Image (cartoon, rainbow, N blue to C red):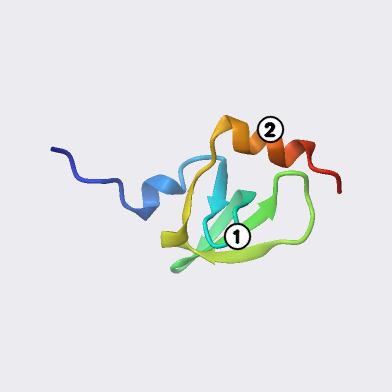
């Protein structure tokens, strides 16, 4: 059995989900144990703990892009 990926592998994807809120964002940078994200459609940045983000699925990204601003 292989070990589950650690939080760094979650950040290698261009779009991630903040599991606290379900928000989909682009990873801009990592500051310590926090990840700085921005909505995939642009807008206000926010921070999330690195261990609470995961890669976004194509369906999640498509839904986020389709949401009205």
The image shows residue 23, relative to residue 60, as above or below, that is below
Q: Is residue 13 or residue 2 the one in the foreground?
A: 2
**Mark 2 crowd level (few <14, some 14–19, many ≥20, 10 Å Cα):** few
Q: Position of residue 63 (x, y in %)?
A: 70, 37
Q: Is residue 28 or residue 47 the one in the foreground?
A: 47
**Mark 1 crowd level (few <14, some 14–19, many ≥20, 10 Å Cα):** few
Residue under label 1, please give it. 21
The image shows residue 31, relative to residue 1, as above or below, that is below
Identified at 68% across, 54% down, the residue is: 38
Q: Secondary structure at mark 2?
A: helix
Q: Position of residue 34 (x, y in %)?
A: 50, 67
Query: How many numbered marks are there?
Result: 2
Residue 2, by quadrant, is top left
Determine which of the numbered discs, if any, sits on residue 66 in the image.
none
Residue under label 2, please give it. 62
The image shows residue 32, relative to residue 52, as above or below, that is below
Q: Choose the circle earlier in sequence order: 1 or 2.
A: 1
Identified at 59% across, 53% down, the residue is: 22
Seen from this angle, which residue lies furthest left?
A: 1
Instruction: Tell whether label 2 touches label 1 (CB within 8 Å).
Output: no
Q: Position of residue 28 (x, y in %)?
A: 61, 53
Residue 32, by quadrant, is bottom left
State how far apart marks 1 and 2 are (Cα): 17 Å
Identified at 79% across, 42% down, the residue is: 67
- Image position of 33 (left or right of 19): left
Q: Secondary structure at mark 1?
A: loop
Residue 15, by quadrant, is top right
């Amino acid at each position: 059995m292989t070990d589950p990926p650690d939080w760094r592998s979650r950040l290698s994807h261009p779009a991630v989900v903040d599991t606290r809120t379900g928000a989909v964002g682009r990873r801009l940078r990592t500051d310590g144990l926090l990840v700085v994200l921005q909505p995939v459609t642009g807008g206000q940045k926010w921070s999330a703990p690195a261990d609470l983000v995961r890669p976004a699925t194509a369906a999640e990204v498509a839904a986020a892009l389709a949401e009205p601003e």
